[in-house]
Image: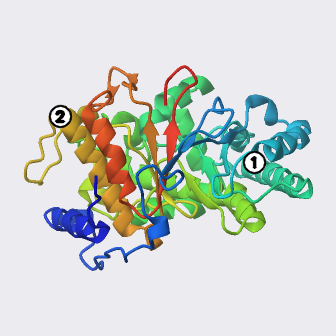
Amino acid sequence: MRFLNKTIIWIFILSILQTTASCKPDDSEVIIDEPVEEEEQITKGKKGTFFGLVWFSYIKEPQDNLYAMYRDEKRDVQAGDIPSLASQMKARMQQLPAGKRAYMIHEITKLMNVGAQTIYLDEGVELLRERVEELFTRYKNLGGPDLDYLAVDWEDNQQPWGLKAKVDNLDISYKEYFDQIINDPRYQTEVRPKLEALGFDFGTDPGKNELSSLYESPLTPYSAGIKNLAIWSIVSRERISEYLTRAIFEPTQRHFPNVKTSNYHYLEIPQGSIAGFDGNGINITDYGAFHKVGTHSNVPTYGYIGNMFNYPPRGYQFSTFQKTPFNSMLRELIKVQTMYLNTEGNKISAWIAWPSYSGNNKSVVSGYAGSKYYNEWFFHLGLFRDKSFFFSCPSESTP
């Protein structure tokens, strides 16, 4: 089968984007890919031109266009296990071809929580930075080859959506949790000014603290308190980005200047974009932009529609999202197109689940699992400039 000219396909996609103007900033410049050399094109039967990096290392040998990332385990968290981790990582990376060497830093990131109960992770960040620095110094001294990818899976964004589990684990009340945040001197210098700049409405009730709306407001899209919840989320994401940069990305980039780095679901989305709607039907970016951390924007494309069926995006024509496989793919396409157009150098990465993945629970369901639109999604990703993706696939599933 002959492939259509890539430039023609891009012109077609960009013509579609013009019908959803909110997917790119008004003052942005439309970018059309330059023609690529024949060697870089996706060619039927050619290995390595479009490939997945699998997050479980059950693929012992490289398969056709699938390569297993090295992933740290719980035992690697302690300082004494860093030499062993460096040695294992070297052995694994030497088995992989250049351009396909990826490390997924996962369990060791939990060191960021050391000494922290609320949002202030400075102590753990410095500890993690020391471990990352030691790891890559030992790895290079052993003669380990340069890394091509570093995938970080830090998902604790300190947003209100995950607050209940966090507070329950601490065995304190919501008020006590936010009292601790407010009473820390960093609140007045690092947190409150950023909330205020985005228009946060601070509480004035003398019987409550000024952040009480964050735990008293219902987490529904049309509730009166959703503005404060969204602003808190934006400020929290920015804070986590600074921590991850200091703890992981700065030392990694120093050892491997050309490595491609990203963190799960940290991406460039402009303020007010339709792509900012989450699975609850809440558009956090109504109150500020999302930003990547590392070199690449990253987004999970698991086909979630979530609660958008009950809370369709306001103000957008044809905005009612029925829970269909096609709409699941369409929503992912809007997100990826948006981050592509808004990320410098169009540097993006995406996570894809295995074909039968149906979701985490009854409220988080993949709409295109097992359908033809799941297969089609790979063709859409293949049209973007970066020809790699992260593939979430447990060992008992077939990639």
Judging by the rendered image, the residue that carries numbered circle 1 is 93
Q: Is residue 291 rendered to the left or right of residue 219? A: right
Give the camera-side residue of 243 and 175: 243
Circle on res. 341: none
Any part of residue 103 in sight: yes
Residue 281 occupies quadrant: top left
- How many labels sit on residues? 2
Q: Where is residue 333 in the image (x, y as percent from the top left)?
A: 29, 51
Q: How far apart are marks 1 and 2 (CA)?
A: 44 Å
Q: What residue type is labelled 2?
A: Phe
Judging by the rendered image, the residue that carries numbered circle 2 is 309
Q: Is residue 348 rendered to the left or right of residue 143? A: left
Within 10 angstroms of label 1, few (less than 14), some, or many (20 or more) residues? many
Give the camera-side residue of 275 and 199: 275
Above or below 344: residue 377: above
Q: Position of residue 300 (x, y in %)?
A: 43, 44
Which residue in the rendered view is the most extreme toward the left?
A: 317
Report helix, strand or loop for mark 2: helix
Mark nearest the camera among 1 and 2 is: 1
Q: What residue type is labelled 1?
A: Met
Judging from the image, the colouring scheme is: rainbow
Report helix, strand or loop for mark 1: helix
Above or below 205: residue 292: below
Q: Where is residue 253 in the image (x, y as percent from the top left)?
A: 70, 65
Which residue lies at the image location 64% right of the left edge and 58% below the top edge? Answer: 99
Any part of residue 227 in sight: no
Give the camera-side residue of 213 and 50: 50
Within 10 angstroms of label 2, few (less than 14), some, or many (20 or more) residues? some
Asked if the residue under mark 2 is in contact with the one under mark 1, i.e. CB atoms within 8 Å, the reply is: no
Counting residues from the start of the chain, the first of labels 1 and 2 encountered is 1
Give the camera-side residue of 64 and 179: 64
Above or below 386: residue 326: above
